[in-house]
Image (cartoon, helix red, strand yellow):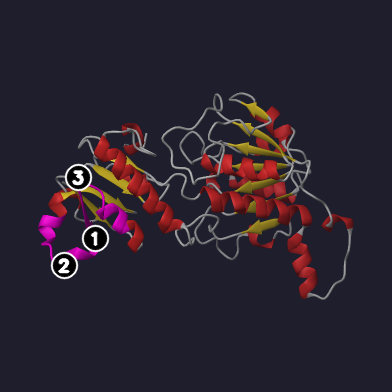
């Protein structure tokens, strides 16, 4: 019998499906607060833990074998000795692909039609039917730097709208295996891009774009990956979208590119400070759309359902000895 300890408010249907699995006992973290199971026993018997962050009782979880995170980010696991304790861990990669890809499409439409200025015109009762408000997306080239789940779902939606899709990756685009994907979404076989660029071809990739979308994780190798040279390589008509992590783009270079019109504008959901201070110049730039890191979040109406599906599938695979979805490597758990 394996005990699954849950520290997220999953729905009844998901919990019932877990409880129906052979050899599985489901416990809730709420049971620690005066529940029917003694707290010490509940902590020590847990084999699988669903959580966003490790609880204070983590050192006492001597039977723990698997952690399923409710977040895509996993820096909260660094330096906690998981690899040394042979504790496996999986993140929530794939759970946020749909809303972030939809944000990407929404921002491309907003930027193309200049809806930010149209709304200002509405507020000021200005009737302006200029051609700059009547452009369309179809036929544009969107470049996706990084081709994980977010990039693949963005590519699927972009292709449906008639855009040409270029991607930039380290080596090649491969089929996805053992990664959570919302059914009917993404590009599992990796066949959608019209053109693939690899390491060393970044400037060539950038030179032909109408939109650049950053869809890579932040790491020591990607911190500041977009600087002055990359922004100057983009055509002046190009827009930059960053739903990934703010520091992927060097802040000073981005401000200079926007002020000096190296690029047409930007849509930014991730930032350099949280919250972005009111005096920051990005707030006042007319060609910039800022959103407060909401492109994909745990307040999405489908979040708990998808986390539940991922947990159920990983518990099933864990019990049957199959490869897990979204499993992190020992080096990833060490923050390397």
Decide: few, some or many residues near mark 1? Use Cα within 10 Å; few <14, some 14-19, many ≥20.
Answer: some
Cβ atoms under marks 2 and 1 closer than 8 Å: yes
Q: Is residue 17 magenta?
A: yes
Mark nearer the N terminus (2 vs 3):
2
Q: Give 11 or 137, whichever is nearer the viewer.
A: 11
Q: Give 37 or 106, whichever is nearer the viewer.
A: 37
Where is mark 3, residue-wise?
Answer: 64
Q: Which residues are magenta?
A: 15-42
Secondary structure of the residue carrying numbered label 1: strand
Whether residue 9 appears in this view of the structure is: no
Decide: few, some or many residues near mark 2? Use Cα within 10 Å; few <14, some 14-19, many ≥20.
Answer: few
Quadrant where the image shows the C terminus: top left
User: Percent x, y for residue 37?
Assistant: 12, 62
User: Percent x, y for residue 74?
Assistant: 37, 45
Number of marks drawn: 3
Q: Is residue 53 magenta?
A: no
Which disc, if any, is residue 28?
A: 1
Which disc, if any, is residue 35?
A: 2
Q: Is residue 45 above or below residue 115?
A: above
Q: Residue at x 49, y 46 (%)?
A: 182
User: Percent x, y for residue 154?
Assistant: 61, 44
Whether residue 237 appears in this view of the structure is: yes
Mark nearer the N terminus (3 vs 1):
1
Which disc, if any, is residue 180?
A: none
């Amino acid at each position: 019998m394996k005990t699954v300890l849950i520290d997220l408010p999953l729905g009844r249907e998901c919990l019932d499906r877990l409880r129906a699995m052979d050899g599985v006992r489901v416990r809730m973290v709420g049971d620690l607060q005066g529940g029917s199971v003694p707290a010490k026993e509940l902590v020590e018997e847990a084999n699988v833990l669903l959580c966003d962050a490790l609880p204070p009782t983590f050192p006492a979880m001597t039977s723990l074998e698997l952690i399923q995170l409710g977040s895509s980010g996993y820096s909260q696991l660094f330096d906690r000795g998981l690899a040394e304790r042979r504790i496996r861990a999986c993140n929530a990669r794939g759970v946020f692909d749909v809303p972030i890809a939809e944000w990407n499409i929404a921002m491309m439409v907003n930027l193309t039609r200049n809806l930010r200025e149209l709304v200002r015109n509405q507020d000021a009762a200005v009737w302006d039917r200029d051609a700059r408000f009547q452009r369309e997306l179809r036929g544009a080239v969107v470049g996706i730097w990084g081709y994980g789940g977010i990039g693949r779902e963005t590519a699927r939606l972009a292709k449906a709208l008639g855009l040409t899709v270029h991607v930039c990756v380290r080596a090649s685009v491969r089929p996805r295996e053992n990664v959570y994907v919302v059914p009917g979404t993404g590009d599992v076989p990796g066949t959608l891009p019209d053109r693939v660029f690899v390491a060393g071809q970044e400037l060539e990739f950038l030179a032909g774009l109408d939109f650049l979308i950053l869809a890579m994780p932040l790491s020591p190798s990607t911190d500041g990956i977009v600087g002055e040279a990359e922004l100057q390589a983009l055509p002046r008509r190009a827009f930059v979208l960053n739903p990934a992590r703010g520091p992927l783009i060097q802040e000073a270079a981005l401000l200079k590119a926007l002020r000096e019109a190296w690029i047409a504008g930007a849509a930014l959901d991730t930032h350099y400070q949280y919250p972005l201070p009111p005096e920051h110049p990005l707030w006042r730039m007319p060609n910039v759309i800022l959103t407060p890191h909401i492109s994909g979040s745990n307040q999405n109406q489908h979040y708990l359902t998808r986390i539940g599906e991922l947990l159920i599938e990983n518990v099933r695979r864990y019990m049957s000895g199959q490869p897990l979805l979204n499993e992190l490597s020992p080096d990833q758990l060490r923050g390397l």
